[in-house]
Image (spheres, helix red, strand yellow):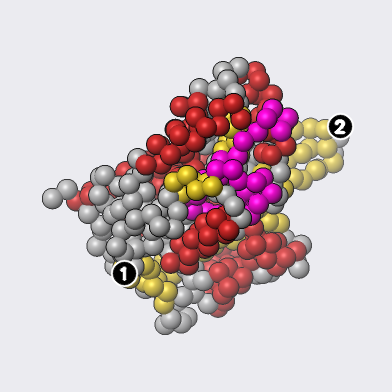
């Protein structure tokens, strides 16, 4: 039997990670971890408490002066050892993500595991660079680490979202307390197993699992947390910003999206549709940057809908460990029901069903929703405005470029987007007009060194690359 194609033997994790060691929680309460493809419980972790957060923050605060004073090349060496220890667990990580999130194993290997390893590798290089300083008149301008970071991460990319916060924070000289999502905490434990093997100094990174209303709120409101870095829903981001504002603490927020994929009249339509559908359905649509609005010129609208329907038909639902599966379940029963409610509302609002829908066949168990496509979606409708966070695509026609840009920008979000055209200059001109944090032109590849973040209600601040490291620093002017 191919072990890579089987679920891991998941063990219940009983401890927190505080001050460089596994520690007993203050409460005996636990949070169950479910396999969304089957609905069965596959493990459990401690339900952390505010007292646990206090211990972890105190450990991070005590470790901060020493870590901040550590030479850049030494911090880089620590991160390099962490990369080696984490890479050694790549197979186990992929199988764990496939089990606790339901991501098909191939995708869990390539994206859920491969991407965070790439990001961590980039942070090794960035950590080795000396802190930048420059002179303005009689002032020396320096960057210093912000302090203790509270990192609160979501369930949809359970390792990448953690690494995208923890690694640049450490590279900048900060210490961290992590609260992973209660839906997918087991992957975070594998990271901390690697942290143990890598021998990071005690207190530099700490782990407190648990629920958002208990652990997340305690971390966001803690007086000794200097910056809260959060990825998740806009509603929760608003709450975290409120808690941090009470004590004038900094926040970095990567929130929702409703990204537009603009297909101009002269585009390579088969490629634009194929890539667009793949992006919209990535990770079962549970991706903040998903291009969930496909905008197509009216002259090619009917052709595009045929291509979309054919592309979606190739996405087979099923067991994440079956090599033939292209689309796994949604993360939870509640998430699946929210997506179904969006589908029902779109039908009630008059959108035309092209594929999928509430009557499409599904696996007999698990939290599955069929990949669903709607045409003739009004730009102001709920389906075009609300983040569904599931495998649902809205296709919208436009008459000219100005209308396409207006529709693309008709959103309270601004996280990602795409433009397709045979004229690369025309595509770039549209990309510049889109009010969003990143835009792919003709399928441009994701760049883990480029700044990642959004406009409007998609958040505050940037992650990844040198921009992500700067997010965890303060500026100081020294007059001489």
Image position of 314 (left or right of 183): left
Q: Residue 40 carries which label?
A: 1
Secondary element at image label 1 = strand
On the question of residue 414 being in view, the answer is: yes
Residue stretch in magenta? 375-403
Q: Tag 2 or tag 1, which sits nearer the N-term?
A: 1
Q: Up-down: is 384 above or below 132?
A: below
Q: Where is residue 141 in the image (x, y as percent from the top left)?
A: 77, 39
Q: Does the magenta stretch include residue 378?
A: yes
Q: Is residue 238 magenta?
A: no
Residue at screen point 60% across, 46% down: 377
Q: Which of 268 and 353 is in front in this view?
A: 353
Rate crowding at label 2 as few (under 14), some (14 to 19) or many (20 or more) other CA atoms within 10 Å.
few
Q: Which mark is residue 450?
A: none
Residue at screen point 57% across, 49% down: 351
Residue at screen point 64% across, 58% down: 234
Q: Which of 21 and 115 is in front in this view?
A: 115
Q: Position of residue 452 (x, y in %)?
A: 60, 41
Secondary element at image label 2 = loop
Q: Which of 77 and 417 is in front in this view?
A: 417
Q: Where is residue 163 in the image (x, y as percent from the top left)?
A: 49, 49
Mark 1 vs mark 2: in front = 1
- Which residue does the numbered mark 2 point to in the structure image? 137
Residue at screen point 37% across, 42% down: 313
Image position of 450 (left or right of 477): left
């Amino acid at each position: 039997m191919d072990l890579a194609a089987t679920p891991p033997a998941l063990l219940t994790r009983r401890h927190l990670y505080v001050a460089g060691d596994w520690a007993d929680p203050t409460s005996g309460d636990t949070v169950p971890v479910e396999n969304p493809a089957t609905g069965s419980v596959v493990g459990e972790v401690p339900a952390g408490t505010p007292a646990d957060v206090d211990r972890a923050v105190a450990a991070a605060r005590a470790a901060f002066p020493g870590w901040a004073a550590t030479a850049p090349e030494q911090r880089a060496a620590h991160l390099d050892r962490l990369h080696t220890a984490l890479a050694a667990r790549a197979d186990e990580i992929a199988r764990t993500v496939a089990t606790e999130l339901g991501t098909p194993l191939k995708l869990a290997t390539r994206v859920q595991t491969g991407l965070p390893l790439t990001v961590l590798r980039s942070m090794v290089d960035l950590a080795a660079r000396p802190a930048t300083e420059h002179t303005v008149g009689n002032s020396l301008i320096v960057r210093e680490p912000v302090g203790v970071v509270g990192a609160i991460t979501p369930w949809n990319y359970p390792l990448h979202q953690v690494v995208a916060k923890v690694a640049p924070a450490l590279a900048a000289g900060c210490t961290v307390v992590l609260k992973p999502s209660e839906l997918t905490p087991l992957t975070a434990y594998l990271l901390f197993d690697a942290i143990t093997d890598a021998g990071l100094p005690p207190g530099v990174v700490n782990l407190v699992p648990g629920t958002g209303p208990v652990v997340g709120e305690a971390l966001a409101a803690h007086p000794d947390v200097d910056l809260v870095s959060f990825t998740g829903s806009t509603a929760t981001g608003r709450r975290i910003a409120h808690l941090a504002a009470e004590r004038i603490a900094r926040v970095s927020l990567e929130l929702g999206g409703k990204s537009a994929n603009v297909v101009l009249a002269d585009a390579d339509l088969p490629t634009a549709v194929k890539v667009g559908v793949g992006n919209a359905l990535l990770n079962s649509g549970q991706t903040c940057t998903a291009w969930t609005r496909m905008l197509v010129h009216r002259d090619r609208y009917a052709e595009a809908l045929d291509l979309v329907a054919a592309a979606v038909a190739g996405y087979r639902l099923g067991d994440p460990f079956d090599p033939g599966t292209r689309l796994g379940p949604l993360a939870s029963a509640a998430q699946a029901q929210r997506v179904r409610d969006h589908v029902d509302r779109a039908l009630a609002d008059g959108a035309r069903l092209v594929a999928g829908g509430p009557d499409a066949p599904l696996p007999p168990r698990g939290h599955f929703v069929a990949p669903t496509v709607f045409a003739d979606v009004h730009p102001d409708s709920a389906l075009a405005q609300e983040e569904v966070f599931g495998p649902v695509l809205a296709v919208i026609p436009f008459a000219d470029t100005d209308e396409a840009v207006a529709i693309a920008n008709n959103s309270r979000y601004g996280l990602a987007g795409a433009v397709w055209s045979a004229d690369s200059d025309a595509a770039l001109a549209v990309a510049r007009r889109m009010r969003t944090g990143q835009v792919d032109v003709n399928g441009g590849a994701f760049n883990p060194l480029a700044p990642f973040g959004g406009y409007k209600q998609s958040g505050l601040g940037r992650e990844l690359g040198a921009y992500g490291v700067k997010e965890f620093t303060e500026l100081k002017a020294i007059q001489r």
